[in-house]
Amino acid sequence: MHTATCFPRFVKLFVGLIGLFFVSTQAFAASLSASPTKVSYASTPVNGSSTQYVTLTDRGGLAKISWVGLNGAQSRSFQISGITTPLNLSSGKSTTFMVKFVPKSRGNFFAILTILWGTRDRLYVPLSGSTTSGGSSIPTSGSLTISPSSFSFGNVTVGTTASRTATLTASTAAVTISGATTTNQEFTLSGLTLPATIAAGKSIQVGVNFKPGGSGSTSTQFSVSGNAKNSPGAFTASGIGVATKPHTVGLSWSPSTSSVVGYNVYRGTATGGPYSKLNGSSIVTASFSDVTVKSGSTYFYVTTAVNSTGVESSKSNEVRAVIPTP
């Protein structure tokens, strides 16, 4: 029995046109969603500001956004930036913009972020914020430091998750983190329960994760908001999604010198078995291709010969195949 070999799988498709069929299809309706669905700001000093990010995503066809604005008697205490209308979003695409809380007096403030899209559709995101006691324009909180300020994940196989760690530190005074957003949903944070308070001079660690959904380079900007003097704190991350390459194990063996009608191929994941039969009916040639292997795995193969009465021979010697990654 010859040594197994691994090689990329190439598939050729041969398509024959046997007729023309006209099928009437209905277009997918657009569906616009907002994340988060409501925004709450941490206590903010009078004449200070706090920033949150809102992401609009089209879940269906083409979403046509005609206007984004603020409604409510206290809407002047909030500001929108980073988005221009009219704006067309194709299916699955997103846009992210900033919504600031800029109180000019003490109290609790409320407004409605309104998005007009389609012909008559509307999307609403409630906004709420409050000011710190005393009405001072000087924050009583410390500054937030995020280290490192950027992450490079390099190549990551599509569908798998790579993780790094960010350290968030409060200086001079305690800092309360009330929000954290990302401009790319392939990048996420973990281990951060909001609201989170960091004591003066102390640090917490947060997981930074990258799970590519497709091939190619991509990046994000994370925004961490709260009552820090320098809120929102921001850091970036980038990575490259690498598609998993399909592999095939090619097996061949010396034909039996006895009278046989075919062969069976068995595979296991540990040397010595147990083995599972891969073929249905007997193989009439002295070769077989296993196209069900997974990247990064190791397999062990044996074969048997089958006579006309269905009796199998003893198993052949075992060979090992190591599948590359990806």
Image: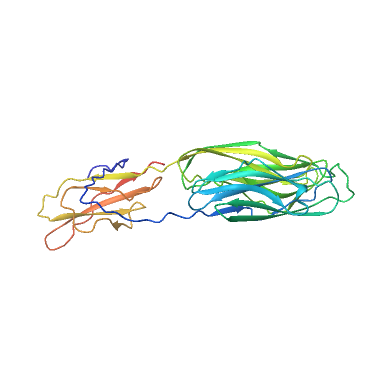
Q: How many marks?
A: 0
Where's the C terminus, which quadrant?
A: top left
Residue 302 in picture, x, y percent from top left:
26, 51
Viewed as shown, does residue 44 lie left or right of 149? right
Who is closer to the viewer here, 245 or 28? Answer: 28
Where's the N terminus, which quadrant?
A: top left
Identify which residue is drawn at 29% across, 54% down. 22
- Where residue 26 sits, quadrant-wise, is bottom left
Q: How is the image coloured?
A: rainbow
Residue 199 in picture, x, y percent from top left:
79, 47
Viewed as shown, does residue 300 lie left or right of 211? left
Spot the residue most to the bottom. Answer: 309
Residue 288 in picture, x, y percent from top left:
23, 48
Who is closer to the viewer here, 39 or 182? Answer: 39
Who is closer to the viewer here, 156 or 62? Answer: 62
In the rendered image of this protein, does residue 95 appear above or below residue 258? above
Who is closer to the viewer here, 44 or 89? Answer: 89
- Asked whether residue 19 is in view, the answer is yes
Viewed as shown, does residue 314 lie left or right of 182? left
Spot the residue most to the left. Answer: 259
- Where residue 249 sits, quadrant-wise, is top left
- Asked whether residue 162 is in view, the answer is no
Viewed as shown, does residue 260 lie left or right of 123? left
Spot the residue most to the right. Answer: 134
Residue 222 in picture, x, y percent from top left:
64, 42
